Each structure stands twice: as structure tokens, then as C-alpha cells.
């Protein structure tokens, strides 16, 4: 494995003379060029979509395609760097994303993106079928796992405050190829997540008028099951949310803050009323399905915590990233974990777990204590949560897409930022259009399995990237330390997979689990004996390597808890991504990385011109 070169010193990063590579389709002139008039944002030429030399004509593409194996090898070994992501790739957008967010905005964005329908839909189902009152512990464990991932995201976002989030972080530490696989899953997660939220909104909205959640859907008998209930309401609400997000980041943040304050007051009401009508006898037995049921529930309720990665994508638009991102991300997730545990405890103390309704747990619970009107309050809170999740999701997904386009893994036209709104309108429209089509046809169970796998897979890669960033730096880590670190990392990942496999095979007894846990412990201890090569300057993950190693174990375990159909869909989607990469992606990214060679007129002495290729 090869790791990115060290970033430029901060004094160099601030040097206005540094231009790194100029974009293949530049908006601003270089020092030896005449100024060009500003380009219109609303343009649609082939040069804007495929500016790379490999796609100029058919002969150029044939020549590029004949070098596919060489280019694949180059991209698999290629690494980006902090400065490249922060300075060079931003030029592809031609206009800056507006810095307008504070830590208060980030806290409310975190609350709005995470607190959606999950707490209302999943809690009752898992408490009834898997965990009983121990659903509280399930939420605590899942919240702890999510917090570990938040720590990893926060350290990266503070040091590399860029719109790409996990895509940029993985590109820096694990390379272009891994970043492309992550990019495909990020886009898959964006589409599936947005469509799933829209379908959930439609179901909850319909439940306010009818006991049939498909009341507002149109059934087409000729379509396959899972794709035969057309949902126009989901399309409309998704389109509205994305239109608001395109108008401006601060406007979306303000709308989310107002809606989230209303939601918070409703949640406080639910918790207080729940505890006022609580009976401690309803907590017996606490583990009716044993520890196994509690862990199964933890794997499922983890979905209620997803969404915080969208807040990390707003780092480029944060005024003071070093201060605001840790306060916003860690603060919001810690608060949400406590709120979820209190809501789960209130439900299981208010109603015996055997009497909890699987589909509308809180609404039915309030009916049982004589507050039938409260079901409308609960439905309103759930609808608000889904709406704000769509709002923030559309912002975060568009920022992911923008950075992926800046790296030319998809056409750089999608990286353009509108000069007035300061938002990536084309990137937003791309995700919106695809999400609306998927939301119209696909059922929630089809979407949720794809979403869970992609999310957990990226979280696991982020923990690996954090360990790589701390322990393994090109031209600084000795070969001996490199080998020790790699062996320890393989042991940690391998033992995590082994423990997960044992659980999936329903292995009896704790002997084999102790062996797997022993290997995981030994791999983590071994990593402690390797000298760290990088120390965070501002904010860092505590207890490294233990917390990232725990994050790897938990995310692999949760992936293993998903059904076989989720694996099947994941590998099919990954196969489609690889076909695109071989045909298009590898050639576009190769041309961008080697721009200095395809544009020989660039000034060789430019201070930053070799930064990206130096990372290979």
C-alpha cells in the first residue's frame, strides 16, 4: 500500500501564486494567458461533460482504452493529498460554496438529518420481536458505534474541510480505486436514502387518513412485487425538498432549525408523558429474547442513527471548521443517543413489550393510556423528521456528488457551483432526478437493505482510513513499521469478519468467540507498538487505535447481520460501477492526474504543479 505525500505547509497553502494543476476546463486564466469573459452557468456542451483528452474523439478513446490495464494500475496506486482536495479540485466548480454555517447550524443540521422516521417505525418492531425492554441497550450500543464513526469523520473534516466528506478522506488515505468504489456506494446511498425517506413520508402521511399505508399509491399489477406500487406523493415531496436546498445553504439550515425546534418540543412531550404513565413492572423480563435478541435489534436500529455523514459534507461551508465541526457533529450525536434511549425506555415502561404495536408503536401506546389525539402529534413529529432528513440529505448528497465530479469520476459539469446561490445546482438535480424515479417505483424494503450495506461499508472504510492516516505516511514510515502495521490491520479486519461469521452461523458457546476476540485484541495491541506518524493539530479521535478498531468490528458485525439479499444487491451494484470505471472513470481520472503531461505548455516551475502525481 502506498500513502499520500505530506500536505503542503500552511504557509504554502495560503500562497496565492500556487495554482497546482489548472483545471482541464479552467474558468480563470493562468499567468501566461489572456483573461476570458466569465462563462455562463447554464451551459451544456460536450467539452463541459467530457473535457479530458481521452474523450475528444473516437480515435483518442480507442487509444486510451488500449491502455486500460496500465491506467488501472496507475489509479490503484494513485493517492490524492490534503492540498489537492482543498485547493486544486475546488477550481472545477468555478465558484465558491458560501461559508455561512456555525456550530449551532451544524448541531441542528445533525439533529434534523438523523432524527427521522427510524425512531418511530423501528423501535416498536424491534422491541416486540427481538429485544423487549432491552431495546434501550440496543440503542445505546448502536449509538456508541455511530459515535465512533462520528469521531473518525470529525478528525478528517477538521483537517480537510472539503465538500467531499468520506470520498475525499478515502481518496487521500486509501487511493483512487477504493475512493471510486466508495463514491459509487455514496451515490447509491444518496439515491436509496432519499427515495426511502420519501416512501416513508408517503406511508406516514397516508396513515393519518387510512389504516392502509399504501392508500395514496397506485398499484400496477403487471410490474414485479416490490416495484408495483407507484408513489407520486414521494416524488412530489422529494422534489420540493431538493428545490429548497438549491435555493441556498443558509435558507435550508434556517428552515431545518425551525422544524427541528418544533420536533424537539414534541419529543420532550412524548418522553415526559411516557414517564408519567410508566410502570416498572413492564420492564420485566428485561432480556426476554436473550442477549442475541438485543444484538439483533442493535443491528437494525443502527439505521436510526445514519445521516450524520451528511453534516460532515458541509465542512467547506463552515465558517470555523476547527471549532464548529467537533461541536456540531459530536454534540448532536451525543444528544441524539441520549434522546433515543429515553424514548425507547419511555415506550417500554408505558406499554408491556408484548402489547407494543409493530407498525405504530407510539401512536397505539398513547391510545392505550386514553390519549387518542396524541397519535396525530406523533405522526406530525415523524413527518417533520423525514422532511428535515430529506432537506439535509439533499444538501449533503449534492456536496458528495460535487466532489466526485471535481475528481472527474463523473462528468465535471456536475461540479459547477452557481455564482448567486452558492450551491451545486447540477449535482442536486442529478441526485433529485434519479431519486424521484427510484422513489416512484421501489418499495421501502428493497431500498433499506441497499442503504444499510452501503452506509456501514463506508463507515468501516473510514475507520480503516483513520488508522492509515495516523500510522502510515509515505516517505516517513519505515518499511519495518509498515509491515507491522499492515499485519495488525489485516488481523483486526480478519478477526472482525471471523466473529461476524460465527454469529451468522449461530455458533454455540463462547469458545470460538473468545478466539476471534483474542485475535482482534492482539491486532489492536500490536498496532499500539507501531510508532504513530501523524498527530492531529486541532482535534483528534481519542484512544487510537482502540476506537477505530472497535468501529471496524462493529460495522463489520452490523453488515453481517444484514440478509443475503443485501449482499446480492451490493455486489450487483458494485459490478455495474466497475464496468463504468473501466469504460469511463479510469480514463477521466488518469487524464486529470497527469494533466501536466497532456498540457505541456503549463509552467514547469509552478510551485504546486506536481502535487497530485507526487502522491503516486
Image: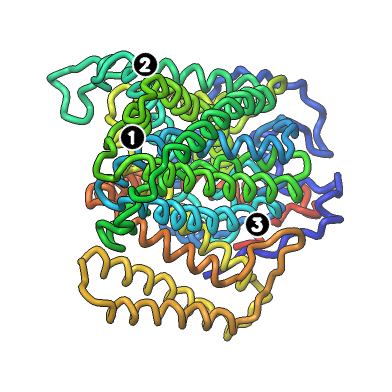
- Give the camera-side residue of 133 and 601: 133
Residue placed under numbered mark 2 in the picture:
233
Q: Residue at x 61, y 17 (%)?
A: 42
Q: Residue at x 72, y 20 (%)?
A: 420
Q: CA distance from mark 3 to mark 1?
A: 38 Å
Residue placed under numbered mark 1 in the picture:
361
Q: Is residue 277 left or right of residue 164?
A: left
Q: CA distance from mark 1 to mark 2?
A: 24 Å
Q: Is residue 127 left or right of residue 32?
A: left
- Label 2 Cα crowd, 10 Å radius (few <14 / some 14-19 / many 20+): many
Ranked by sequence position, the earlier of labels 3 and 1 is 3
Q: CA distance from mark 2 to mark 3?
A: 39 Å
User: How far across and down, in percent of the image, does residue 487 sit?
Assistant: 47, 80
User: How far across and down, in percent of the image, does residue 156 sit?
Assistant: 64, 55
Residue placed under numbered mark 3 in the picture:
155
- In the image, residue 573 sits, relative to residue 285, either above or below, namely above
Q: Residue at x 54, y 59 (%)?
A: 148
- In the image, residue 126 sits, relative to residue 357, either above or below, namely below
Amino acid at each position: 500500500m502506498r500513502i499520500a505525500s505530506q500536505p503542503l505547509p500552511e504557509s504554502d497553502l495560503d500562497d496565492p501564486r500556487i495554482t497546482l494543476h489548472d483545471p482541464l476546463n479552467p474558468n480563470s486564466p493562468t499567468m501566461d494567458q489572456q483573461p476570458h469573459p466569465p462563462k455562463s452557468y447554464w451551459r451544456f456542451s460536450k467539452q463541459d461533460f467530457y473535457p479530458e483528452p481521452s474523450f475528444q474523439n473516437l480515435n483518442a478513446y480507442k487509444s486510451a482504452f488500449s491502455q486500460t490495464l496500465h491506467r488501472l494500475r496507475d489509479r490503484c496506486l494513485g493517492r490524492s493529498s490534503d492540498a489537492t482536495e482543498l485547493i486544486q479540485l475546488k477550481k472545477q466548480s468555478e465558484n465558491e460554496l458560501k461559508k455561512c454555517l456555525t456550530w449551532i447550524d451544524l448541531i441542528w443540521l445533525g439533529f434534523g438529518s438523523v432524527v427521522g422516521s427510524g425512531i418511530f417505525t423501528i423501535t416498536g418492531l424491534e422491541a416486540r420481536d427481538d429485544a423487549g425492554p432491552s431495546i434501550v441497550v440496543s440503542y445505546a450500543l448502536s449509538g456508541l458505534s455511530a459515535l465512533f464513526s462520528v469521531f473518525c469523520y470529525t478528525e478528517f473534516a477538521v483537517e480537510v474541510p472539503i465538500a467531499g466528506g468520506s470520498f475525499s478522506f478515502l481518496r487521500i488515505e486509501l487511493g483512487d480505486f477504493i475512493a471510486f468504489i466508495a463514491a459509487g456506494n455514496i451515490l447509491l446511498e444518496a439515491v436509496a436514502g432519499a427515495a426511502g425517506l420519501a416512501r416513508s413520508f408517503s406511508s406516514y402521511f397516508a396513515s393519518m387518513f387510512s389504516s392502509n399505508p399504501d392508500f395514496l399509491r397506485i398499484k400496477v399489477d403487471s410490474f414485479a412485487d416490490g416495484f408495483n406500487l407507484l408513489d407520486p406523493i414521494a416524488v412530489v415531496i422529494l422534489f420540493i425538498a431538493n428545490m429548497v436546498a438549491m435555493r441556498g445553504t443558509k435558507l435550508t439550515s434556517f428552515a431545518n432549525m425551525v422544524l427541528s425546534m418544533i420536533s424537539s418540543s414534541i419529543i420532550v412531550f412524548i418522553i415526559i408523558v411516557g414517564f408519567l404513565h410508566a410502570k416498572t413492572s413492564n420492564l420485566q423480563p428485561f432480556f426476554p429474547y436473550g442477549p442475541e435478541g438485543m444484538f439483533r435489534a442493535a443491528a437494525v436500529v443502527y439505521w436510526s442513527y445514519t445521516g450524520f455523514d451528511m453534516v460532515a459534507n458541509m465542512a467547506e461551508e463552515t465558517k470555523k471548521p476547527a471549532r464548529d465541526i467537533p461541536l456540531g457533529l459530536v454534540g448532536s450525536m451525543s444528544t441524539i443517543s441520549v434522546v433515543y434511549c429515553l424514548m425507547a425506555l419511555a415506550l417500554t415502561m408505558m406499554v408491556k413489550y408484548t402489547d407494543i404495536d409493530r407498525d405504530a408503536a407510539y401512536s397505539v401506546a398513547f391510545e392505550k393510556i386514553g390519549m387518542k389525539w396524541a397519535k396525530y402529534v406523533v405522526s406530525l413529529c415523524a413527518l417533520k423528521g423525514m422532511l428535515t432528513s430529506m432537506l439535509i440529505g439533499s444538501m449533503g448528497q449534492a456536496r458528495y456528488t460535487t466532489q466526485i465530479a471535481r475528481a472527474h469520476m463523473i462528468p465535471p459539469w456536475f461540479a459547477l457551483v452557481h455564482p448567486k446561490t452558492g450551491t451545486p445546482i447540477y449535482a442536486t438535480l442529478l441526485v433529485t432526478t434519479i431519486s424521484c424515479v427510484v422513489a416512484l417505483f421501489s418499495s421501502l424494503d428493497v431500498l433499506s437493505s441497499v442503504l444499510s450495506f452501503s452506509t456501514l461499508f463506508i463507515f468501516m472504510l473510514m475507520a480503516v482510513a483513520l488508522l492509515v492516516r495516523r500510522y502510515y505516511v509515505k516517505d516517513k514510515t519505515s518499511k519495518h513499521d509498515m509491515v507491522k502495521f499492515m499485519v495488525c490491520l489485516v488481523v483486526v479486519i480478519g478477526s472482525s469478519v471471523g466473529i461476524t461469521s460465527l454469529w451468522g452461523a449461530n455458533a454455540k458457546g463462547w469458545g470460538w468467540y473468545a478466539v476471534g476476540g483474542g485475535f482482534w485484541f492482539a491486532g489492536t495491541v500490536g498496532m499500539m507498538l507501531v510508532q504513530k506518524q501523524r498527530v492531529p493539530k486541532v482535534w483528534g479521535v481519542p484512544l487510537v487505535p482502540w476506537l477505530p478498531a472497535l468501529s471496524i468490528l462493529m460495522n463489520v458485525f452490523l453488515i453481517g447481520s444484514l440478509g443475503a439479499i443485501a449482499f446480492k444487491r451490493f455486489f450487483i451494484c458494485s459490478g455495474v460501477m466497475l464496468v463504468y470505471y473501466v469504460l469511463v472513470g479510469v480514463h477521466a481520472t488518469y487524464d486529470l492526474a497527469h494533466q501536466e503531461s497532456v498540457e505541456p505548455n503549463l509552467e514547469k516551475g509552478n510551485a504546486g504543479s506536481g502535487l497530485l502525481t507526487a502522491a503516486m
